[in-house]
Amino acid sequence: MYLLIVEDEPAVAQQLKELLEAEKYRCDLALDYKEALSLCDEKHYDLILLDWNLPDGDGLSLLKLLREEGDSTAVLMLSANSEVDDRVSVLDAGGDDYLCKPYSNIELLARIRALLRREGNQKNTVLSAGALSLDTKSREVFVKEEKITLSPTEFDLLELLLQNRNIVLTRYQLNEYLCQDYNSLKLSNIVDVHIKNLRKKIGLENCIVTVRGVGYKIS
Ligand code: CA
């Protein structure tokens, strides 16, 4: 599960990120409106934790803009505004849930789980690129309608590349991602080895593109 935290208070943002990462969620952080908007345009998140008051805009406008653009990513608004009218305006703008600051971590995590469950039930869980498709829910991968078998690490790597279609992921990022999940030894070529195996199993030419000196991407 891939979450975006939008929070302008660096200490609060970092704390939130650590809390969520301890629960095995993958998180990106945006410290202002502009950064949040560009990340939402670029990536596909399962849930956005959105602070209302941002230095260069407000969360409610961001939510409205996303919905206008047809982005239906679940949004949990976090705000110190506790009036009923505020909650109503968030829900009316297409927000999925609302939590007043200060909140308890236990309640926050419970609400996140509930939203992600709902998302998981509704959402299309298939990521694809050309003849390749991956179902994040059933953990199945198909090439030209034919099922192929990947190791868990290969699956996770492919899922990450597909979630970031057209974006180059550096070897460092990919290595960090794999090691955080598997607590494995940091071998400098571990990513290259997995990519090589993935390419062999997928068997499609130019599916995973090498960006020389940087990393890999799927287009
Ligand atoms: Ca704020």
Image: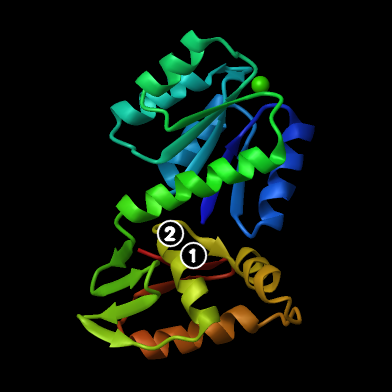
What residue sits 60% from the left and 78% below the top? 191
* Within-10-Å neighbours for mark 2: few <14, some 14–19, many 20+: some
| Residue 46 seen in the current view | no
| Residue 21 seen in the current view | yes
Q: Where's residue 104, x and y in %?
A: 71, 35
Task: Specify the label residue 63 is tagged with.
Answer: none
Is residue 28 toward the left or the right of residue 156 in the image?
right
What kind of colouring is applied to the model shown? rainbow
Q: Is residue 34 above or below residue 57?
A: below
Q: Where's residue 86, x and y in %?
A: 50, 12
> Which quadrant does ligand 1 occupy?
top right
What residue sits 60% from the left and 50% below the top? 27
Report the residue marked by disc 1.
160
Q: Quadrant of the C terminus?
A: bottom left
Report the residue marked by disc 2.
163
What residue sits 29% from the left and 66% below the top? 129
Ligand 1 lies under 8 Å from the Cβ of mark 2: no
Q: Work out how far the residue at label 2 is from the one at label 1, CA to CA, in angstroms.
A: 5 Å
What residue sits 39% from the left and 55% below the top? 120
Numbered disc 2: secondary structure: helix
Q: Nearer the viewer, residue 53 or 105?
A: 105
Q: Is residue 141 above or below residue 33?
A: below
Check if mark 2's residue and mark 1's residue have beta carbons within 8 Å. yes
Numbered disc 1: secondary structure: helix
The extreme right residue here reads 11
Q: Where's residue 76, x and y in %?
A: 51, 33
Is residue 8 toward the left or the right of residue 152 in the image?
right
Amino acid type at image mark 1? Leu
Q: Is residue 39 above or below residue 25?
A: above
Quadrant in the picture for residue 215: bottom right
Amino acid type at image mark 2? Gln
Q: Is residue 11 above or below residue 27?
A: above
